[in-house]
Amino acid sequence: MRQQGDFLHVLKEHGYGSETIMQPAFGQSVINPAELTTGTTVFAMKYADGVLVAGDRRATAGNVVMYDRTDKVLEIDRYSVMAIAGVPATAFEMARVLEHSFKYYRRSQLQDLSFEGKLRALSTLLKNNAPAALAGTGTVVPVFAGYDALEGCGKIFFYDILGAEFEAVEYAVSGSGSSTIRGILYYMNRWGDGPVAGLNEEDALIFVLRLMTSAAEFDSATGGVDAQAQLYPIVKRVSAEGVRTIPADRLKTLFSEKVLNHV
Amino acid sequence: MYEEPYRWIEAVENRRNYLDDQFMQGNPLIGVSFAQGILLLTFNRGTDKIYEIYDRIALGGMGHPADLEKLRYTMLDMAHVEGFQRSPADVTAARLMKNGLAPVVKQAFEEIYKAPYIIKVLLAEVGPTQERDRLFSINYDGMFEEQREFVVMAASSSIREILLKEWKPQGPSSSLKDALELSLRLWGIASVLQSAAPSSDTGEEDVKTDVLAPSSSEPTIPDDEAIASRIRETLAQETLECVLLDRETGRMETYRTLSQSELQPLIPQEFVPAKQQ
């Protein structure tokens, strides 16, 4: 008997997943991984009211900027967000599978999928994708953040390309620009004015914008903030009330007052 | 013994009689399109009868819970696979009904060696505007109808004709309270008529001549007190189940079950059971 409420299984019954373009044979790299779009900076960090998840807007292929309005912070359902780094084709597809899986589970089983169950679902997708990840054509390294209704708190998880799942205590980062951010977060938590997790929403948002600007400074594949083109990172807030996108206007004000002109 | 055509027709006729009896005890289900969305209303004795199928689509059922569950899964699978592989915009109640539900139900009904589905199903799809709301009902034999303003599912499909006389168009200023009041009243009428009729749906012609619609006179709507007392009795004994497909949420998902505390203030005073007044 099939596992109840398993959307991936339903999809497979309808022929999904038999496509082979994402899974070239081992040792035969059809595409030079450098030509794939992988560069990015995404991160999630806890703050006083929950979790903020942010991502830059740039999509690159090698040293070519492909697109400047990518949304890498994807709302999977009302209480969870996935920030993606890696090959967009696979990453967006995973997000869509997850979104439909959670909906399908809730509607068929008449109860919400638990937070644990959601994590497991993402882990399974990554594991199934391992051959493509190892071949370099389907690498996805996501950060997953959500509100755990059972425990009443926001949580952050990050994954390796094979689907191993790790819980982040304070923050998680992914993508080519992430090492800069990781360094700053470590420094701030250790020698800053206090743990980042204690910041209020406004201070946390300012911090997010500064982190993104720093990442863009040292990583050509990270878009950072382009105030001239009105391009701000996508920032989403996850809390007991669900997922909310921080409006670009608010980021604009904070950026010009506290990032650009701040000494 | 069913090789001969007339035997087969006879078997199908027996099936109709058998199925019609199954629905006599069932609770009617009402769907009303109004300004804010679509309201679906029924009563239940513990098991819910209204379910979410997709972002803008809900299903209501009457009949055997196991059959309903099976068809609900068929609808869910169809809707989600389509929504995933194409787009949520391509998932419509019309397609689910015409390509998904109707052929399955009709086939089961006519395969006289197998058990039919003991169900009547309602599909409601809320549109971006009231003009684009769609309501479908399907009978156990696979016959389905498409409506725009309201739909009723009851033991006899002829009840809709009678309820049409009571129908008040829900214009752009109609509120949830208006829609609930009207739905409750329609439910009450359907329920009283249903229990007054000894049999129903025994063929196209018979429907017109049964107790619901005596050939001598126009079908009569029960008096207000009979309707109110039926609603009061049912409210006291069963659970009012209301779902709103809310076009004004601003989200992809529109389905919301109205809680008892939300419903209480909306129920007209004359329908509230005595001990709760």
Image: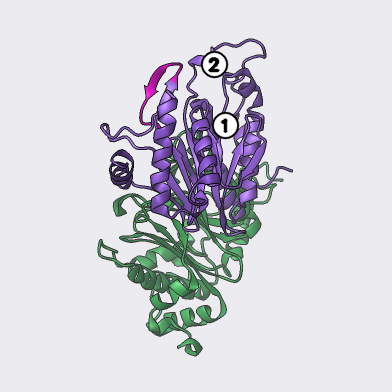
In the image, A159 versus B239, the foreground residue is A159
The residue drawn where x is 39% and y is 83% is: B269
Q: Amino acid at mark 2?
A: Pro
Question: Disc 2 marks which residue?
Answer: A33
Instruction: For mark 1, give the secondary structure.
Output: loop
Residue B107's spot in the image, x, y percent?
59, 43
B179 over B98 or under it: above or below: below
| Parent chain of label 1 | A
What is the tally of numbered marks visible in this picture?
A: 2
- Left or right: B80 in relation to B7: left
Q: Amino acid at mark 1?
A: Val
Residue B104's spot in the image, x, y percent?
57, 44
In the image, A153 versus A111, the foreground residue is A153
Chain A: give its colour. Answer: purple
Instruction: Find the magenta span and give its range.
Output: A61-71
Chain B: give its colour. Answer: green
Magenta stretch contains residue A62: yes
Instruction: For mark 2, give the secondary structure.
Output: helix
B35 over A59 or under it: above or below: below
Colour pattern of the rendering: by chain
The crowding category of the residue bearing disc 2, from other C-alpha atoms within 10 Å (few below 14, some 14 to 19, many at least 20), is some
The residue drawn where x is 32% and y is 45% is: A258
User: Do discs 1 and 2 belong to a common subunit?
Assistant: yes
The residue drawn where x is 57% and y is 23% is: A138
Q: Earlier in the sequence, mark 1 or mark 2?
A: 2
Residue B110's spot in the image, x, y percent?
60, 46
Question: Disc 1 marks which residue?
Answer: A141
